[in-house]
Image (spheres, coloured by chain):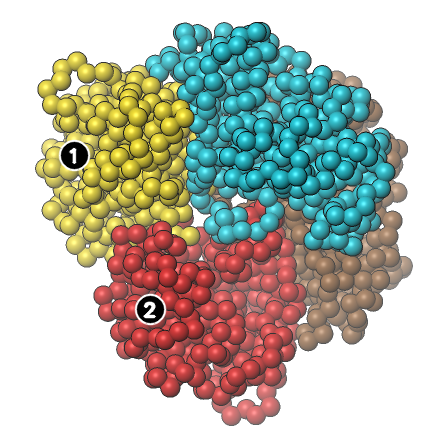
Chain colours: A yellow, B cyan, C red, D brown
């Protein structure tokens, strides 16, 4: 298959190229970057020296595209809307890493604080979470690849919400992310001296992944519970915090148990829900996930805990924000869309 | 005043010595360490070169103590009980950094998983949180210096619990600590390679600071609400997590609001509660605390947030676990006990 | 081929298993660890969950070994000598990660400060640096896998020494290593709090890789210069320093130029020397190597610089101490020994 | 004394304010910043909350200055030249943190790659290294505060060069600095993700501190050796490298010994040279300096080593680039200029 990668100098784009560099079934024929137009990949990202991508030249993202089967848009919010209609006309199938097609227009405008211009979100984008939408992804023309926080929180809470274990109107998601989640453009907030040996919250109660999580959990619940018309709304409080590490997201999610349950009962439910998922592991009771065990992989590690004293279900989840939280999930979706085995090229071991 | 410091090679002990080295009103006449007995301070901790403590020699902690007014016990749990009775007989006033005198015997035995031997906790230890017990501390013979997580969580939640803002039976304290909180003895879990670029939870639902926080908040509420006999129990779920930094604790505490409140109303209550506290700052609405702004200081920075969508009060708090969470608070207590101005020697600026 | 891995819980052993886990031509039939005997790999190193090695059980390193073709000894200095004779008797081919077979007995005893017991180094071990000994490695029964500092310094200086560019009696190798180089056993010197935000030298002038580098450079020069009997000795001053990172070695090597040369002339010599090496890259003049471009790979990146003002040749080199500096080089040797394509399983991209 | 601080939002400016905040003999009456004009200090740098500087407002650096005794210019290269003449006219004494007045014009233009405009360097600036120029500093009107690398290298090599121990034409200074040395403006090269878990050299052989070190060592030697007209030139090769830490410089300096010497002989010379220096410590033979022992202090720690095998003198030196390498040295100079005890306000202990 012939592929174009937009935003190829950002962290998401670079990881995408790394995941594709050894794939014999994939040809990357075009990489886009406005800032590096005309340069070779190896001159901008030296680690590609001696690989078959070394001499790929960056093209302007506004210009003509060669014939490709898939376009991977590892670009900031707002870019995809400017190019998706043209790509679809040319029958290019698209995986968009940004938030452009994840939400209804009015929700997008509120949480992204940005007017929707050009086209509205009526392109029937499929939300690219294989654990929820595997079949639809296979046929999709346009994938809204999920956000990194959203993927982690959704995988953590989906079984509990589907099975009605917790009060869904007062969920708390305490989430922590490595710095690569903030992108590669330098800011004072990602300056080494300001981040190292520190920690802080940001966008408290207003992070744009909040409605993405709520609508995904709501939808998961609706499917499970059939024709229920007026179900409760799912409401989460998402606290996002900056970890002084490069990569990795860690979520601790709290819900009030509707009835008393043992940890083994909850474990069974999670275990069964993810039994056939190649990239979700529910750890045995008593273990907790750890970022370094999944860093550099497409894996999500989960653990479930019940606190009888406060009647609380606690679920921990961790994944690599650049892989299962972005580029890895995009390749997983690419595999599904192209009829390739789902885990192809995604078996890398953790880095530590 | 003449002072002895036990456990002087641990992180708490070293910070204690650093806080005292320039104090003209303090004489450190004895430092204890079983492992380094016979060596000089400067040979074990080179940063004391060229200071007046450089030639202090480490003494065995089992031996005779010279005449001192105060003993600071920066020792692991279990040590204080073996020595406190003798010290009190010699009219030495004591500040114990460990958990030995913070809890009733039976609670201690359960959460520390350790039998109470020797003497029981009937020495009328005063819990050394100046923001709650300032007057009692001044007269105390034996101070149970609070735990680092406990200080942070208590300062975060005390005003809300005292003023009945939240449901006290389902509080969530999501807490993160730097590695120095685990002490200076090397373990695989504090090995640089295992900690750096990682993050994980530990002791989920079973951390020994849980009952310490609950009893402090309960007591704060009881005092405020007068003679109430059968008040609700305070119940928290404490999730402790390891940050890949040296120093600093960060708490995000969540409570279900009993009635709808604006963030300014909550801010007013917190502001008033801590108005005269030299080491607690409630940040203006809209700001969030950050570890590097308090690292190396005796300050606790707090911020309060109200999430209307989930009816949740969120309080963030940060402090340096070795200072306001240990040695700094001990010196604050020492100042109070000795009639010295409370902030003496505690005005250091943040390190970043 | 059937393989046994000794020392499988150390960093070298774990990386070895990671490099083999996807190899269809390799069967790992036995893993050794004295501390974890009886446990499964997945219970000690969770990242192996869902891999074919997950259920491998650790065996005692003193016991019987099943039939294997190769034994990889990722064990501390001193262990190999206790087991190599038996293994050779059973016709097992061996790759030893330690210093046991790299030096003549008397040199070993002096620099390792350890008596040689059991057998002397007369087993005709081949020094496993493919860039020097490729042909001999193919036939070897026992490989002394080079040290991490030694590999970096040797690759940095070999062309200059072979071609007589510099005064070989006063070479300076200023070397820096990540903490994993110190092994996985916890010590105060590898405690996160003692390492992070710090930097220091250690073993100044006495590091045991010194004679290993000197003898390798001497041998490389001898081969190039033919029958010269009484050539100058190679003498280096090796300064080893601890970087606050997990992985990676960086060497800046200085030599006094025998005659004035331009940087392009030196570059040509290096370029030609390593033209056919799959894992050594000489960067174009003007670029410098960077650890994150090779971290997680088997690559060594070099750059050469000429300082006219001081008549100095400066060569920089970087590699991942656990890969090209240990496990990766071992697998490269395994490939050579087994007649497999040399780069098999070693094409991983850098982690950052 | 009344003081103005220019560049008060950079790392050098912030550290300067931290060093002055508790000084009763100092009034900071003006702080300058072009970007933050009109804001209060506490709103930009929250750690100043509850200090007497909290409400200081930032002024434009182009506008009028109130009456002050001293101006501290913690500004980038090029700024001082635009303002120094005016300040001197108003009898303001100046400490300039930049390279503007450290070098003769033609040397500056070559190494800083920048034309000297406005005024030439004929203002009789005194190079503010107290260990060389203490008496001249006391009377100076304009201080060129030394560079951070230059201070470290000069303190490391001064005694050896003065006493003719080494060949001065082929000195090697292998220098490593924390990221704060690159300033506070965000660039890709200081982005957390690009720096953490990495290491690299930069400006190889062309760093602008090279001539600053050479001229200082030459001058030190000239003074010691009296009327020598045609002495050898001092030539160093300076390799600058980026450490993944916030603060701290570490230098390993190599010189070829002119004659064989023991380490104790060298130690004696160094010890005697710095015997009366409050901020330079020569460590006992066998010890090596460590960044965390001096981080946050105005101390420079040195150690000397002799390698007989290569006839090399190795000197290690470390200091905090923001303190003894910038703001701390500036305050040391301010103390000397104002007749205050030299160490006033500079006794802070190391942070770790």
Q: Is residue D10 visible?
A: no
Q: Is residue C28 visible?
A: yes
The residue indicated by pointer 1 is A133
Q: Is residue C221 above or below residue D65?
A: below
Q: Residue at x 39, y 84 (%)?
A: C88
Instruction: Give x and y (percent) for residue A333.
Output: 19, 41
Q: CA distance from mark 2 to mark 1?
A: 41 Å
Instruction: Give x and y (percent) for residue C230.
Output: 60, 90
Q: Is residue B157 above or below residue B72?
A: above
B172 vs B282, nearest the viewer: B172
Disc 1 crowd rating (10 Å Cα; few below 14, some 14-19, many 20+) is few
The N terminus of chain C lies in quadrant: bottom left
Q: Residue at x 53, y 25 (%)?
A: B213
Q: Secondary structure at mark 2?
A: strand
Callout 1: residue from which chain? Answer: A
The residue indicated by pointer 2 is C30
Q: Secondary structure at mark 1?
A: helix
């Amino acid at each position: 298959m012939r592929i174009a990668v937009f935003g190829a100098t950002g962290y998401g784009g670079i990881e995408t190229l790394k995941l594709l560099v050894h794939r014999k079934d994939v040809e990357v024929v075009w990489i886009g970057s406005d800032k590096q137009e005309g340069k070779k990949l190896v001159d901008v990202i030296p680690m590609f020296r001696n690989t078959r991508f070394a001499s790929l030249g960056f093209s302007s993202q506004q210009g003509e595209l060669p014939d490709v089967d898939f376009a991977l848009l590892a670009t900031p919010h707002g870019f995809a809307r400017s190019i998706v209609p043209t790509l679809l006309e040319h029958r290019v199938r698209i995986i968009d890493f940004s938030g452009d097609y994840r939400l209804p227009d009015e929700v997008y405008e509120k949480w992204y604080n940005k007017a929707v211009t050009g086209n509205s979100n009526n392109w029937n984008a499929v939300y690219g979470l294989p654990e929820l939408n595997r079949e639809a992804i296979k046929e999709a023309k346009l994938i809204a690849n999920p956000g990194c926080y959203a993927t982690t929180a959704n995988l953590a809470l989906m079984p509990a919400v589907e099975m009605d274990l917790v009060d869904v109107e007062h969920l708390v998601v305490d989430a922590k992310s490595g710095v690569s989640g903030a992108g590669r453009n330098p800011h004072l907030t990602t300056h080494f001296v300001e981040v190292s040996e520190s920690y802080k919250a940001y966008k408290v109660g207003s992070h744009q992944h909040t409605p993405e999580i709520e609508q995904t959990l709501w939808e998961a619940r609706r499917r499970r519970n059939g024709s229920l018309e007026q179900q409760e709304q799912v409401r989460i409080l998402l606290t996002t915090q900056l970890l002084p590490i490069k990569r990795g997201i860690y979520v601790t999610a709290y819900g009030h148990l509707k009835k008393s349950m043992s940890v083994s009962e909850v474990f069974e439910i999670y275990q069964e829900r993810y039994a056939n998922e190649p990239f979700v592991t529910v750890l045995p009771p008593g273990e907790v996930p750890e970022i370094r065990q999944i860093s550099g992989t497409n894996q999500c590690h989960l653990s479930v805990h019940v606190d009888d004293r406060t009647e609380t279900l606690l679920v921990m989840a961790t994944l690599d924000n650049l892989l299962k939280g972005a580029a890895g999930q995009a390749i997983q979706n690419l595999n599904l869309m192209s009829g390739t085995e789902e885990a192809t090229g995604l078996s890398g071991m953790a880095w530590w």
